[in-house]
Image (tube, grey):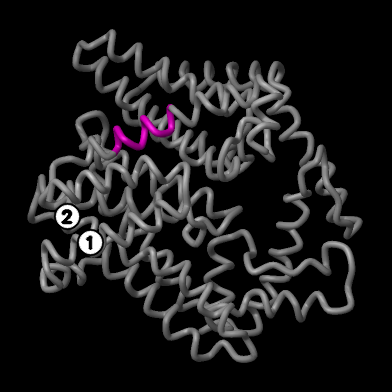
């Protein structure tokens, strides 16, 4: 068990940096869990909704390869592989039902992101380092700014929660330190680089934080102060100004059906509008069971034939989690998806019961909300970094809660 804990800590540290190392360690952890606990232990909890529904989504993806007509097998298997990560929720929950080292895993993840944060600032202020490592985006040493923002926001909000817990316990110095570290993550997002999706999920997560610890008139004062701070950041941050102003140019791009870049970045807003328009049509043509696993790319290719501009773009991802599921597995898949999100929110419901609620459950609740909100503009359950981050939080926190309360559903 100690070896598994140590391996998962390394895995948490590797996740923000390397896809290949993360994949190798994920396989190693699964093998060690199977050897340590045995297959029979895994079957004890699989009927619980929080674990059964991820398995159900995996199951429909597996069966869905059979009705994906005129779709290459490479596309079917690639789409199916994106769903397999959901199976890891149950083994992680099984292990952390016995282990008490969840906070150490979180500490390893935070430490790794602190190193990434420092590297991001160096990259941002030093053109020499930027060109030396061949970075493609300001302040983003590895992966991409969407992945980096997802991790930075989750850590910043959780650290603010830990600061509030410390303040309630009379540990003011610790609270100040945690607030300072959280503010550094948020400063990087404001002035270096940020995914525009964070404009959606960060306010929701901060609202959940405020509702947990603040009541009455202080809550209104906090919201007013946050609005004033946001206005100040928008007025002083070229990064935020660029991110918001590009949106209007991207809308013009969509109206003109033109593919172009704004400030060197693809017109992502225009592309999403076109992807969603087409995706709704795909869903209408097969509303119940969808077109099958891996069918998205072939559908976009058929719709793009003979067209130019945005209409001629071919993708395998509609950049919306609901549409990504509905295209392939119809309304049946969507029911499973929404049921899974709902089951995981219910699993962590104790976290939203105010400051007396379980803080670990609150972390799980916030992580699920972040995934749901970010999945409006992305297919984050199917993306590598965001999908695995979701699986790790749900599995680890869910297992710890079972350890604290074995009879909980």
SS for callout 2: helix
Q: Residue at x 21, y 66 (%)?
A: 48
Badge 2: how crowded within 10 Å, few (<14), some, or many (20+)?
many
Front position in the image: 142 or 371: 142
Front position in the image: 406 or 182: 182
Image check: 89 left or right of 274? left
**Rendering coords of residue 243 (x, y %):** 72, 35
Which mark identifies residue 91?
Answer: 1
Q: Is residue 357 above or below residue 224?
A: below
**Rendering coords of residue 344 (x, y %):** 32, 56
Image check: 248 left or right of 55? right
Query: Which residue, as the protein is rendered here, is positioned at the far top?
Result: 173
Q: Which residues are magenta?
A: 106-114
Front position in the image: 133 or 55: 133
Q: Is residue 283 magenta?
A: no
| Quarter of the figure with the C terminus | bottom left
Which mark identifies residue 95?
Answer: 2
**Rendering coords of residue 31 (x, y %):** 23, 64
Q: Residue at x 84, y 43 (%)?
A: 249
- Give the CA separation, mark 1 to mark 2: 6 Å
Q: How many marks?
A: 2
**Rendering coords of residue 118 (x, y %):** 50, 24
């Amino acid at each position: 068990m100690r070896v598994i804990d140590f391996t998962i800590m390394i895995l948490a540290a590797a996740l923000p940096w390397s896809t290949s190392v993360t994949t190798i360690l994920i396989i190693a952890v699964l093998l060690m869990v199977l050897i340590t606990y045995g297959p029979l232990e895994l079957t004890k909890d699989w009927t619980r909704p929080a674990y059964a529904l991820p398995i159900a989504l995996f199951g429909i993806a597996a069966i869905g390869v059979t009705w994906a007509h005129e779709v290459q097998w490479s596309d079917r298997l690639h789409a199916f592989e994106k769903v397999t990560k959901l199976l890891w929720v149950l083994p992680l929950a099984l292990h952390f039902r016995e282990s008490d080292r969840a906070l150490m895993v979180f500490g390893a993840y935070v430490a790794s992101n602190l190193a990434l944060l420092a590297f991001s600032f160096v990259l941002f202020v030093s053109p020499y380092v930027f060109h030396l490592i061949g970075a493609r985006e300001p302040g983003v040493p590895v992966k991409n700014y969407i992945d980096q923002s997802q991790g930075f926001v989750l850590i910043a909000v959780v650290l603010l929660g830990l600061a509030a817990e410390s303040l309630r316990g009379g540990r003011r110095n610790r609270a100040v330190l945690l607030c300072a570290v959280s503010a550094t993550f948020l400063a990087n997002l404001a002035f270096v680089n940020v995914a525009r999706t964070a404009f959606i999920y960060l306010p929701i997560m901060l609202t959940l934080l405020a509702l947990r610890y603040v009541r009455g008139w202080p809550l209104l004062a906090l919201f007013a102060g946050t609005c004033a701070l946001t206005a100040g950041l928008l007025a002083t941050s070229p990064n935020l100004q660029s991110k918001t102003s590009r949106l209007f140019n991207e809308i013009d791009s969509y109206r003109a059906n033109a593919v172009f870049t704004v400030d060197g970045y693809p017109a992502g807003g225009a592309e999403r509008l076109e992807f969603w328009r087409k995706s709704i049509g795909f869903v209408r043509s097969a509303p119940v069971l969808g077109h099958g696993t891996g069918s998205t790319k072939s559908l976009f290719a058929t719709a793009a034939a003979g067209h130019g501009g945005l209409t001629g773009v071919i993708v395998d991802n509609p950049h919306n989690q609901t549409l990504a599921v509905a295209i392939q597995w119809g309304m049946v898949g969507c029911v499973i998806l929404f049921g899974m999100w709902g089951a995981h929110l219910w699993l962590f419901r104790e976290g939203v019961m105010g400051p007396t609620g379980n803080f670990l459950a609150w972390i799980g609740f916030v992580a699920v909300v972040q995934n749901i909100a970010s999945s409006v503009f992305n297919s984050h359950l199917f993306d590598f970094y965001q999908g695995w981050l979701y699986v790790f939080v749900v599995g680890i926190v869910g297992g710890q809660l079972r350890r604290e309360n074995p009879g909980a559903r």
